[in-house]
Every structure is written in C-alpha cells, then in structure tokens.
Image (spheres, rainbow, N blue to C red):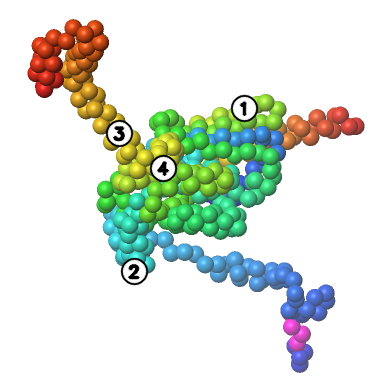
Amino acid sequence: PLSAGWLPALQFVRRGSKAVTRHWKAMHFQRQKLMAVTEYLAPRPAVPPRCLAPRKETLEEDDGYVRLLRRQVEEVFRDNRMIAVCQYNSMPDEDVVLMRHYLRKHNIEVKFVLNEIVRPVLSQSKYKNLLPLFVARNILLVSPETKAKEMLRVLKGVPQINLLGACIDDTILSRQGVEKFAKLPSLEASQGQTAGALALLPSQTSSLLQRGSVHLTALLDQHIRRLQAGETGSPAEPAPAQSLGAP
Amino acid sequence: KKMASKISVVLRPVKSIVVRFCPFESNVESTRKFLRCINHKKIQATNRNCEVTADVRHDGSEPLVDVMFADGERLIMKGANLTTIEMLTALRSRCNAKELQEEQKSKKKSP
C-alpha cells in the first residue's frame, strides 16, 4: 500500500548557488535537452533562390539630400575658375583647421566630397576626364581666382594631402601641369610680353625698308659737306639728293 | 572579410615608403587605399621616423609601392593587380619577420 504522502522524484537542493545568480549558471540537463530540441530552424525555400530568375533590383529613389548635394557640386563647377582635386589621408583636426585658414586667406575654399555624388554629376557634364580621379577619399580646393603658387606652398606644408590634378579655366591639368602653371608669369606680364614681341617685327620691317634710302641720304649729306668743306660748290648735288630722299 | 583599416602594421624596421601612381589611370584604387591606410594615426605612431611620400605622376606608369627597410632591404609592390589587403598583409609579414630577427640579434648580443 502507498503511503499517504509521497516525496517528489526530483528534489531541488539548495547547495552552492541559488536559482538567480550573477554568473551564467549551467542549465539542468533536462533543460539543456529541451533547449537543444526546440532550437530555431530557418525555413529553407524549396527551390534555392539561385535557380530562379534574377529579380530586377528596384531603382533607388533619389533622396532630396542627394539632389541637394549634386546641385551644390554643379554650382561649384560652374562658379569657380580653379578646382583642384587632392587625395585626403587622415589628418589631425587642428591641421585641417589650420590648412583651411591659410587657404581661406587666398580665397580658396576646401570642400569634402563623396564620390558617389560627384561621379554621376561629372559623367553628365563635360568633365568626363576627371572621372578616374574620384576614387578613395578626396577633397576639392575651389577658388574663383587662380592662385596656384600659394596653393602649392600651403599644400607642401601638409604632407598628408596629395594633389592629384586640377581643372583651371576648363583646362584639365596634372600635377606637373599645375606646377608649371604656377611658374608662369601673371596674365598682364605675359600680355605685355606678347605685344612687345609682336611689335618687334613690324618695327624691324619698317627700319629695313627705309635702310636703303636712309643710307643713301646719309652718304649724300656727307658728300655735300665734304664738297662744301672742299669749296667746289656744284649746284647739281642738292637736286638728286631731294628726288632720292622722297621714296 | 577583413577591413583594410584594421590591419595594424608595425613600421619600426621601415625607413621610408614611396607610393608612386598616376591618378588618371584606372588601376590605382588599391594603391590609393593603401596610401590612405598607411597614413593612419596608429600605424604612423609605431614609427615617427618613417617618411611616407606620395609621388603623383602623369606618365601612364603603373602604381608602385617602394618600401626601404632600415637594414637596406627593399620591397617593391606593383599595385596594378593587387588588393589593398594583400599589400598590407605582405608588408606586415615582412615587418614582423624583421622584428623577430632583430630581437634574436639583440638577445644574442646581450646574454
């Protein structure tokens, strides 16, 4: 006969730690088994997705922010005469601020650009040859004036920024091109030089043309003086000198 | 897949690094990223004397990384068909090997 009361088959003994502990407590073996059996199994499709026809990717919607940035880039390309593309290797922030300050003194602005925005803008505009430059992190130095010398001087003091190329007055220049451009004299000086060089030839031509008759008149004058000094005084001399001096 | 910026290179045995590329070419991306990773604060902090120069040319030449070590050895990596991670791991393994050599030498000298 069974006794009136019965003791449970499993008795939970409070030895060691309590039920709620601060460390991960090992699960009871039965609980472990339950957890293992009831683990989540991801549903697998009957046909693997690779075998089905590829889904056409939905076109990304044009964000208003992206549009704004693109418009800004277009404005930059329109407004400024000089645009230099440089590679940006990570620089301490104070150096960035200092560099911005020095460039701002020469009216050069520093712009950080994202490639994914600049690339579509460039491919549609006429600056297609600048496309391969925009890989990895870049910055743009833009300015309405073309002060290449000062820009190069500032960039020399900053080793972490490397000038890749520039677009000055719609002409694409490489780094060597920019250095040569910086060595050129200013526009007024070169204009004066050209005008002087052009004016040199006509002045030479006029003097060349006149050389024959000038020489003849000089010779005849000397002859007259010698004759006058010698006191022969023939009246025929002045008449041929006048007719030859005319052309 | 490792991020290129997480690879830490100890530049102590390196004297100078020259990175040459032509930005108007199309195969320079990995070299440019390599240059960017090399200029990171942490890697630069391992050796302040190491000079990293970037040579920007326009003659259609291939991208090149020229590493000059302190014991005179030279490592030239042509980056046209290499990825950034490959170049960084190659440089890192060389640097570690050199470090071990130097440690062994210093241990031998001072027993």
B32 or A220: nearer the viewer: A220
Relative to the observer, which residue lies in front, A1 or B48?
B48
Residue pointed to by mark 2: A64
Which numbered disc covers residue A52? none
Question: Which three-letter amino acid code belongs to the residue tagged 4?
Answer: Gly
Dot 4 lies on which element?
Answer: strand
Please report the residue visible at 26 percent of the width from the left and 48 percent of the height from the top: A126
The residue positioned farthest toward the right in the image shown: B111
Point out the image quarter for the N terminus of chain A.
Answer: bottom right
Tag shown at residue B74: 1
Q: Nearer the viewer, mark 2 or mark 4?
A: 4
Q: Which mark is residue A165?
A: 4
Judged from the image, the secondary structure of the residue bearing numbered disc 2 is helix
Q: x%, y% of residue A45?
A: 38, 60
Chain of the residue under the numbered disc 4 shown in the image? A
Q: Is residue A58 left or right of residue A94?
A: left
Mark number, residue A196: 3
Q: Are marks 2 and 3 in contact (CB under 8 Å)?
A: no
Helix, strand, or loop for circle 3?
helix
Q: Nearer the viewer, mark 3 or mark 4?
A: 3
Identify the residue at horizontal 11%, vertical 22% (top origin): A246
Above or below B63: residue A236: above
Which chain letter goes with mark 2? A
